[in-house]
Amino acid sequence: MFDIIIDGAAGPNMNKFIRLLNRGGRIVSYGGTTLEKPTIDIFRLFLCDMKLVGTSLGSDKDWKEMLQLIEQKKIVPIIDSIKPFSESIDAINAMGATGSKQFGKVVIQIDPIAKL
């Protein structure tokens, strides 16, 4: 369970995030990369004193302060999987597949170009 979830995708995972929050927890949403309008379990949200906060990326000062907080609190993203670049199309398609069990970031690994 979490006190805060920071999300840039929105979409169908919003209710999963609500179920993962502690009482009084917050979801901070800064984007909608799924391009889907989320359905929110509003009853759980208010019965458990949770907050849903929308935000933009803010100023340069805000960005620097966020990076400092991430470093100080040792915040790390949840990684679902790491895929080689050769599988990137399959990885992207799998994220949007019906019934996808993806939870967390899908990382596409790009190998550096070999030196000649």
Image: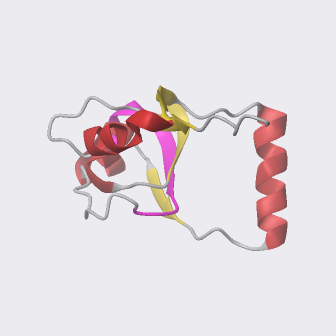
Q: Residue furthest bottom?
A: 59
Left or right side of 69 for 84: left
Could you tell me which quadrant the C terminus lies in? top right
Viewer-proximal residue, 85 or 16?
85
The image's colour scheme reads secondary structure
**Residue farthest to the front?**
116
Question: Considering only vertical position in the picture, is 65 above or below 80?
Answer: below
Rendered residue at 51%/47% (across/down): 26
**Looking at the picture, does residue 105 appear above or below residue 63?**
above
- What is the residue that sits farthest to the left in this orientation? 98
> In this rendering, is residue 36 above or below 73?
below
Query: Which SS does the magenta portion mostly show?
Result: strand
The image quadrant of residue 102 is top left
| Magenta span contains residue 31 | yes
Q: Position of residue 36 (x, y in %)?
A: 26, 62
Image mark count: 0
Q: Position of residue 56 (x, y in %)?
A: 59, 71
Q: Which residues are magenta?
A: 18-32
In front of the other: 89 or 104: 89
Residue 105 is situated, as x and y percent measured from the top left of the image, at 48, 37
- Tell me what residue is drawn at x 33 percent, y 34 percent: 19
In the displayed structure, does residue 95 sit left or right of residue 64?
Answer: left
The image shows residue 51 at horizontal and vertical percentages of 46, 53
Would you say residue 69 sits in the magenta stretch?
Answer: no
Q: Vertical placement of 50 versus 34: above or below?
A: above
Q: Is residue 76 visible?
A: yes
Residue visible at 31% across and 64% down? 35
The residue closer to the viewer here, 84 or 105, is 84
Q: Is residue 22 visible?
A: no
Q: Quadrant of residue 98?
A: top left
